Image: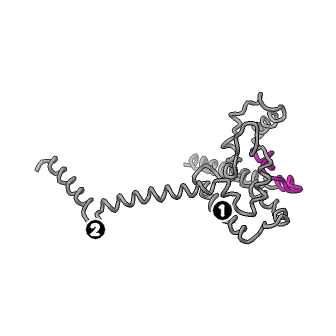
Amino acid sequence: MSDSQEKQGLIRRLWTWFWSPIAVLSVGFILLAGFLAGILFWGGFHWALELTNTEEFCTSCHTMETNLGEYRETIHYNNHSGVRAICSDCHVPDEWNHKIKAKIMAVKDVYHELAGTISTPEKYEDHRLAMASAVWKKMKESDSRECRNCHNFDYMDFTLQETRAASEHQRAIDTGMTCIDCHQGIAHSLPPDYLETYQKISEAVDGEVLQKHAAASGDDIRSFLNKSSD
């Protein structure tokens, strides 16, 4: 038997196996059905995920009415350009891994909604600083990642900005500042004495970053010394 005949025989056997019945259904049918089911599941999952990113969903809880009212008084809601940033633009990352983590962490919001943690204006104000601090810390750690989805220093024309804005943005570039360092109250009202709390958060995050760099540098030095000794 020639090589071509052996190959044809192998292909024929694989094709027969692929469509051979297992109990009632063939292997091919099961695989195709599984593939189509996977597409439907992924499409449904993605659709549900995007649904939770809408402004209507984000503000559907009673406790978010205060947030919504404050947001509607800011430049992110109404501005000269007509570009509107909604809740998910600032609070939900675009990158898949960060997005899924944010969605998992958001489960706590459902708990607090059910528990009534901020169900009254008084309770809301009592927790405002803690809620703001959590967001500030997250944004400081991510280098204001969500802000940079729309705002990027590289794309700014400082000659078109007001003098103070251009000067502050240049200072931010020169000193390695991030958006949230200056724009803590860009979308929501600020709690009393917030600046001292933010400074503590900023110092803590900067300290963690320095420690990581120091640890990485130490590893590099140790690696270099080990290679030298060899």
Residue type pointed to by label 2: Ile
Does the magenta segment cover residue 149? Answer: no
Q: Position of residue 97 (x, y in %)?
A: 58, 54
Main secondary structure type of the part rendered in magenta? loop
Report which quarter residue 193 is drawn in.
bottom right
Q: Does residue 43 appear left or right of residue 10 in this picture?
A: right
Which mark is in front, 1 or 2? 2
Location of mark 2 (residue): 22
Q: Does residue 160 appear to the left or right of 2 in the view shown?
A: right
Q: Is residue 203 visible?
A: no
Residue at 53%, 58% in the rendered image: 45
N-terminal of the two: label 1 or label 2?
Answer: 2
SS type, badge 2: strand
At a point 24% along the width and 56% down the height, the residue shown is 15
Q: Which residues are magenta?
A: 179-198
The amino acid type, in three-letter code, at marker 1 is: Met
* Residue 83 seen in render: yes
Residue that carries the numbered disc 1 in the rendered image:
105
Task: Identify the disc placed on residue 158.
Answer: none
User: Can you name the residue that lies furthest to the top here?
Assistant: 159
